[in-house]
Structures are given as C-alpha cells and as structure tokens.
Image (cartoon, helix red, strand yellow):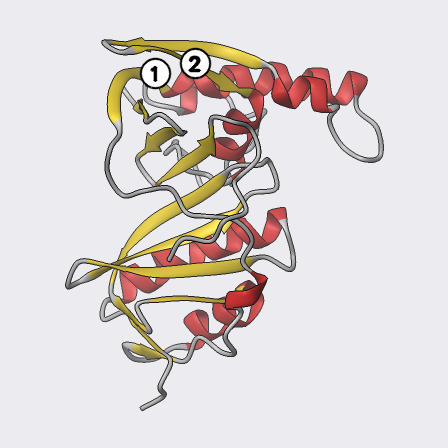
Amino acid sequence: MHERVLTVPEEAERKNLAGFIGHALRLDESAVIRMRRRGDAHLSVWASTGFDALATRTVAGTINPDDTSAAGDQLLSAVEQATGELIDPGFAMDSAWRGALPPMDGFEHLDDVPARVLIELAQRGNALALEHGSSHGPPASLLDQDVLEVSGPSGTVGISMRVIFALTAMGFVPHAGSEAMTADIDLEQIDASELVRVRASRSWVRLDARFGSIYRHRGGSIPLMVAR
C-alpha cells in the first residue's frame, strides 16, 4: 500500500470526485486539489476557482495523510482509471497550495436564495463581461461588485459576482438535461424550489448548493497564511 493513499470505496463517489476535479481543471488546467479528512468516513476536496473563491465538495472516503494536495490532472486520471477503492493520488503538491482554508464551523445561516436568482445574476454578469471584458477576461470592477445582499440576525453580507461565477462554473446547481451548467442555461431547467444556502462568519461568506460549496474571504482575496 502506498504511504499516500486515497480511499474511495463506492464507484458513484469516485465519479462524484472526478466531476469536481474536472470542473476545477476547466477553470485552471494546472489546478491543485487539496484533500482533507472529515470525520471517520468522509473527506473534503478543495480547489481554487480563479475568482478569488474556493470550491469544495464532500466525498465518502478517506485520505492519508489527513491533509494533502495533489496535481488535479494526475489525480483525475488516477480516479477515472481506478478499478477499486485504493487510489494513488500521485506526488505531493502541498507547497503549491496557496492560501488558508476556512474553518469548519462558526458560520451563521443567513438565508436561502432560489438557485434561479443566482444563475440569472450569472447570466447578466456574463453579458456584461462579454460587452466590457478583454482578452484578460471580465473587468475586475464587475467581478468585485456585490450583486446581492443577504441579511440575517447579525447583519448583512454582500455576494460578489466572483462568488456567483464560481458557483456556476463549478456546476454546483442541479438542472434538467445532460449538458454542462453554463451561464446561459435556460432557467426553466432549474427547479424553482432549488435553494442555495447563504452562511457567513466574521471572515468568510459561504454559499452551499446541492453539489458543493463556494467560500470567499470577506476581506477580498484569500489569506496567504496556510492553516492545517
């Protein structure tokens, strides 16, 4: 057995993991995937989205060491080719991970937002990006703009276009049909009752959708201090 080993017993969970890594690689072909044990039978997988926001999904399985990073392309190949539960994640890429992970707890539930509202905002933002963007992508002024405010007992937080774009790009909102989630998807393909939960702590804002979560540091960019 390899010293570094990823264990994912169920084939469905291996497909779940592969889907997450695939979305991350479409955003960044050199994406680094961080895996951290979560309890006795689950692990959380993390990726940077390129929007100054982190994406995460929980998978049934374990990782040894308890917190390790791997190259996304190598990890995806290993997961897709796996015929059993034991997977070699490849060379350690811990030094390539930039930024701290958010804490596991300390988040207050503010409100639930219809997924259609968020995808519609992504569509509007995409149209503006096409109109005002350049070869370098959407203008920072558009990405940094708060396009939604969500209030709870302890206050109000703004949701920036960066978070909306990250949620859409990672395909975290379920929809009818077999095509990949894009910003121009027909809103009718998203169930009107599908909700995205908004939570916040003093330092982070968090959107929890059915297929994963997006985190963004409330100070803007992700802090560089690495917390393990």
- Could you tell me residue 145's position as x and y percent? 60, 15
Give 144 or 1, whichever is nearer the viewer.
144
Left or right: residue 81 compared with residue 126? left
On-image quarter of the C terminus: bottom left
When asked about the image quadrant of residue 198, the answer is top left
Q: Where does label 1 land, which residue?
A: 114
Q: Residue at x 71, y 24 (%)?
A: 140
- Could you tell me residue 182's position as x and y percent? 56, 32
* Amino acid at circle 2: Val
The answer to whether residue 179 is seen in the rendering is no
When asked about the image quadrant of residue 1, the answer is bottom left
Left or right: residue 4 compared with residue 53? left
The numbered dot on residue 117 is 2
Q: Residue furthest bottom?
A: 1
Q: Residue at x 56, y 53 (%)?
A: 98
Q: Residue at x 58, y 19 (%)?
A: 123
Q: Is mark 1 on a helix, strand or loop?
A: strand
